[in-house]
Amino acid sequence: MFRDLLSSTPWDTSLGVVAAPMRHRAMAKAIELVCANVKREYYGPTALCPTGPTLFGKAIAMT
């Protein structure tokens, strides 16, 4: 993961291949964030924010 300080979404990640062991904290956090965004109809500054690479990068940073 990298952080882009010049972007409106600094937690972008590449999701070409994602693998994690069972019950990985970052994956659980990502699912939690997706559910929260869907529930409150959050769309974010870009299309990648509510459920995509930006959200996954945020979940990694939070764990």
Image: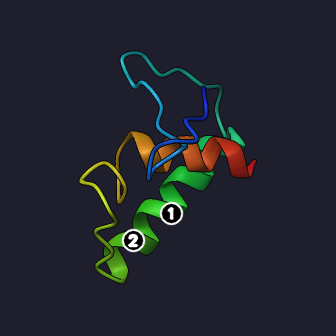
Which amino acid type is shown beneath numbered disc 1? Leu
Q: Quick one: label 1, few (<14), some, or many (20+) residues within 10 Å?
A: some
Does residue 2 sit above or below 26 in this rendering? Answer: above
Q: Is residue 47 left or right of residue 2?
A: left
Question: Circle 1 — which element?
Answer: helix
Does residue 47 sit above or below 56 in this rendering? Answer: below
Residue 9 in percent (x, y) is at 46, 49
Which amino acid type is shown beneath numbered disc 2? Asn
**Residue for point 39% across, 71% down:** 37
Q: Is residue 58 left or right of residue 13?
A: right
In the image, which disc is placed on residue 37? 2
Residue at the spot of label 1: 33
Nearest the viewer among 1 and 19 is: 1
Whether label 2 touches label 1, CB < 8 Å: yes
Q: State how far apart marks 2 and 1 are (Cα).
A: 6 Å
Nearest the viewer among 15 and 29 is: 15
Q: Quadrant of residue 53?
A: top left
